[in-house]
Structure formats: structure tokens, C-alpha cells
Amino acid sequence: MARLVSAKLQIVQFIICLLFVSSVVAQNTIDEITVTADFRVRPELDIPSSISVLDKVFIEKSSTQHFQDLIYSIPNLNWSGDGNRPRYFQIRGIGELEQYQGAPNPSVGFLIDDIDYSGIGSIATLFDIEQVEVLRGPQSGRYGANALAGLIYMRSAVPPEEFFKKIQLRVAEDNEIAAGFAFGGPIDISETAKYRISVHRHQSNGFRNNSFLRRKNTNQRKETSLRGKLIWNVRDDWAFDLTTMFVDINDGYDAFSIDNSMTMLSDKPGKDAQKSSGASMKVIYSAFDSLTIELISSLAHSIIDFSYDADWGNDLAWAPITYDYETKNNRKRQTVSQEVRFISSENTGSFINASQWLFGLNLLKLNDDLVTKNTGIYNDPIYVYEDSLNTTLISEYAATSLSLFGQLNFNVNESGLLTFGLRMENRNVEYNDTENLDIGPSEFMTGGDITYLNNISENLNGYITLSQSYKAGGFNLGVIPKGQRKFNQEKLINIEVGIKSIWDEGRIRLNGSLFYNRREDQQIRTSMQLYANDPSSFIFFTGNAAKGKSIGSEIEARWIPNDRLELYFNAGLLRAKIEQYSGPDTTLNDRSAAHAPAYTVSSGWEYRYPSGIFVMMSASATDEFYFDVSHNQKSKAFELMNARLGFEKDNWSIQLWGKNLTNKDFAVRGFYFGNEPPDFPNALYTRRGDPRQVGLTFDMRF
């Protein structure tokens, strides 16, 4: 805590100075924020949970291409740089770091317009995205086994009331160029149906230089997204909301080097590509006086190619030794879900005196087919040693989950609301592969919460929540330590207290939370290298720690002191520990979790001149964290600074922006193993984050 205060005191002092300098009476207000990731669409003030909501204005002002650019503004959210774009997330120190093999089993849910992309979130491009909601803490009562740690929910922009078009052009360093176009409006004169369509294309080199191949685009980013949305209200009884999307992420993966620099030596650069198509349909029937029926259907199909040069070198780099290994993963994933909700109208009191009630069913089917190929050769002419590798593993995984869930709300006096939530889920799995592993476990899981929300005053709500979340058990593949074939489901008990407040006619917003959780049978995924001269011989397996715990807090503040100035300050504190580990590595006992920094801080301000000129600055700070549970190597704490200078006039704007202005060297992933022949000494290899980048963005609406 002392390190946090001393290292980041400048940021806090800067914010305080701005607050006291601003004395002009405020003219504008903060629009009401509504949350759509809950069972009911409600104002954020009425959600008894720690939530970060990034609205359309914040996303557009940040001039971002991908969700990756927003992560450091969200308290207690981190990501693993195991791929070109963030695919694996950690909320409050809980989440996955990779998935090279094994069945999908995410801890952080990831949805785009009710389409489930949990565990494959690299398609999170942001053009024409209206809102991003990050729900911290257990969400199994709402979303089942995939939301043990929390949920990230992205919502695309809704169709407009009147016909509109917008274009966006963007150029930047790293040979970046991007263009987007969106249009939409009413379909008929009665305006009961509206549509919106958008298309966006982005490409850049990826900030790496491959000196061996003499290329600067081996870590390239080529990202295309298409979105369509149709809303149709039929009379007063039926409402239809149809969303379709197609995202093609055709990125390279050449991010690690022997000297931990931005200069690569690989002769077979990898690929991190994901081509996803999906659709969702939400149907609302509200003809009954006391009941609304909602049907939510979704399907998604993804083809994922993930490959890498396992030795990170070439023939010249390793001469006279021949050392050449490569790994390719080709994955096909399909999810189909159907959910029906029966939701009471306001204050019906028709079910055991509950003021509001809800119950429903959810069916989720997931198929995941994976082909993994490892090839390589090692030849040491000095020690006269030679070895080769050529293996292929083909696996098929299918899981069917059926869930029954419900929620009851009871009014307590005139200011309190007591909520009981329960979810019961049964999962059946079928798995087989070419190594003759044929297994089909089935398990039953339960989770839920008890929450009390109190309206302390007109501007202030307080809440306390006790919840239990769960994550499915599973099995490990291939060669694994004795007794580690299967692992049990995990349960998380969480208690959280917090406040939500809006003051001064909406110009001040302050939210805060304190949480403590216990993890029973905590799942720990670790790795082991079987052969020192074979970088493809890593095995990954999950075991159960007896216990784990986390304690921490989040605070989010936003203030508009006058019609020119706006400020925000977000912070998260976290202590996430593994208390007891029953696996082979006893050094994990009483150690901090991986990718769980003790603090995450962000702040920013925007000043707008009446002439249309605006200036924005933001800064973030992240503490050191362990890279993995397989070793005890840590990252270094780092700070990032961004800025915007722009001009806005009527229906167009232009802005000059810079990210990581101080060109801070920071790491987002780290491995500790031997990868340098002939002795293969253990060393830390890190994947560096993006360096400084300056660019220009132009927007026009007409």
C-alpha cells in the first residue's frame, strides 16, 4: 500500500488540483447510464455490483481500435499477452492465461450482443460499439459456469430514429491505416422497424522488426468487422432485436525474441487468426399485464488458427546446431444457446409476495474441435546428438449445459430491496482424441446470491452481496503427472459491499466497493517442459488447490465541474493469493496469483474550448505481477500516458492522438524456461507491450 501511495501520488495530486481550480458553475450533466448485461435493463445506480461502463462517448474520444486499448482504464482487469490481441482476461486475479490444449473452461465470460465468445475474445474490435460493460465478481447466477470471475459484455450501436451515415478514417505510425462506414435508419414510414449496418477495416505492422526475414509485418494486424442490427416493434405486444456480425482477425504472431527486444529472428513467423460469425435474436412478448416473456437465441461459429515459431530463431542464429521447431493449432468452435425468461412487471406481488420475480431456462451447446501439430528437428554436431519431432493430436469436445435460474425481489420498508438469486446447471461432456482418450464426465453445479440494496438518499445507494459462483471441473490431456488426469469443479464464495451515487444533478458520479472471496478447490493451470531441447514439449495440466482468497476494492469517480472540463479517476486494489496447493509445485503455497497486480490506477481529463478545440489526457499505472504459476518471475510496474488534441465542428471532428507517449517499456506476458542451445539455461522471456504511437483520426456524421 505504501508503494502505491508514493509511486502514484502525482496522479492523485494532479486530479485534486484540477478539482479545486475549477470553480465555474456546471452547465452540462452526465447522462444516465443503463446496464444491459443484467436480467433487467436498469440504471447503473440500481445494480448492486461493481461495474465499469464505458459508453459510446468515452470509446470514441479514446480513438481506439480494439478493446485492448481500454483495458488499463478499468480497475482490477488485466490480460495475458499470449497472442497478438487479448483473448484471455483476468478479473480480480481470476482468469486464464492460455489454452494450448484441453477443453475450453473460461473463468471470465465474454459476450457481444448476447453471442458467447468466452475464451476467444480477440475479436473485440470497437468500431460502432456503443457500450462496454465489465461486471466484476461472481456472475454464475446470471451466466453460469463461464462467469466465475465476472463478465465482459459489449453492445453494438442501436439503429437510429432518423437516417444517418458516418465515416471514420485513421492513420498512424506502425504503417497503420483504418477506415469505417456505418449507416442506418427507419425502414418504413411508421418507424416500427429500424436498421443499422457498419463495416470497418484496419491494418498495421504490429510493432516488430524481423531482421532475418527483413520484414516489419510478421506481427501484423489485419482486422475486418461487419455488423448488422434490426429492431422491429410489432404493435405493442412484440419486439424483435436481431444482431448479426462477422469479424475476421488475420493477425500475425511474432512477438517473442531471445533478447526480449522488438527485433525478431524467427524464420517461421506464427499466426493468430480468428474468423467468427454470429447472430442473436431477442424476442420480447409483453401482452400480459403482469408478465413479460423474453426469448434470447444465439449462435456463433469460429475458425481459429494459432501458430508460432517455437524456437524463435533460424538456421543462422543457432549454427552450427540445427534447432528448428514449430507448433500449429487449428480450432473450430461452435456455440448455440437458447434462453427463455419469464419476468414480472413492476410491483406485481403475485408470487409469494415478491415485488418482482424472474425465472427461466438456458440451454447451451458447445462444440470445439482442435488439431495440434508439432514438428521439429534438433542436431548438435559437437555432441553428436540428434532428435526429431512430428506429432499430431486431433480432439473433439462437445458440452451440453442445461440451467434453471430464478430471482426474487422483496421490498423492505420504503428504501430497501432484498434479492434472492439461484442457478442450477447440469453439464454433460463428450471428449475423444487420437491418443485414445475417451471420456464423458457429467456434473451438477449450483450458484446464487443474496443481495440487499438500500436507497440511503435520493443520490446514494448502498448494497451488500453474498454470492456463490462455480466453474466446471474437467480433465487433462496427454502426458501428465501421476494423479492429475481429472480435476474438480471450483466454488467461489464472495462477499461485497459498495455504494453507488450521483450528485449535483448528475455532474458527479462516485462508485466504490470492497470485496472478499474464498476459492474452494481452486483450479490452477500449470505447465512443465519434458525435454530441455524441445520447446514444443511443454505439457499443460490443471489441478486443484485446497484454498485461495482475494481481498480488494474498486473506486470510480467522474466529475463535470463546468461546461468545459470533465475528469475521471478509477482505481483498484487487490491481494489475490493461493493459500494451499496440493500439486507437485509446493512453492505455490501462500503465493500471489498470476496476472494479479496489487493496484491498477487510471485517471484523465478533457478540456473543451467554445471554438471547438479540445484537449484530453489520461494516465494509467499497473503494479508488478507474477507472469505465471509455473515459475516465480514477475513483471515490472509500469505507467502509460495518452493524449488527444482535436477540433470538433458541427458534424465532423479531427484529432491528433498519442498512446504510450513516454514510450514505456512494459511486459504483458512472460515465460521462464530454457530455449538457447546447447546448454538451455533457464531464462525469462517476455512479450513487450506496444510502444509509443502517434496518429490522426477523422470522423464525420451526415
Image (cartoon, grey):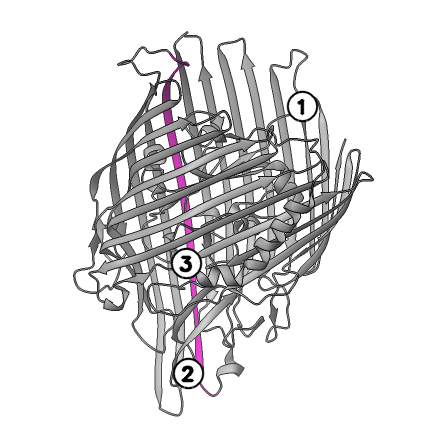
Residue identifier under label 1: 185
Q: Picture coordinates of residue 372 (x, y %)?
A: 38, 59
Question: On the picture, is 627 further left or further right than 169?
Answer: left
Q: Which residue appears farthest toward the right when viewing the image?
A: 611
> Does the magenta segment cover residue 342?
yes
Q: Residues within 10 Å of mark 1 (few under 14, many from 20)?
A: many
Q: Main secondary structure of the magenta part?
A: strand
Is disc 3 placed on a helix, strand or loop?
loop
Is disc 1 placed on a helix, strand or loop?
strand
Residue identifier under label 3: 595
Vertical placement of residue 537 versus 652, above or below: below
Which residue appears at 45% of the width and 75% of the height?
A: 324
Q: CA distance from mark 3 to mark 1?
A: 44 Å
Q: Which residues are magenta?
A: 320-347
Q: Picture coordinates of residue 185 (x, y %)?
A: 67, 23
Residue identifier under label 2: 677
> Does the magenta segment cover residue 694?
no
Which residue appears at 60% of the width and 67% of the height?
A: 208
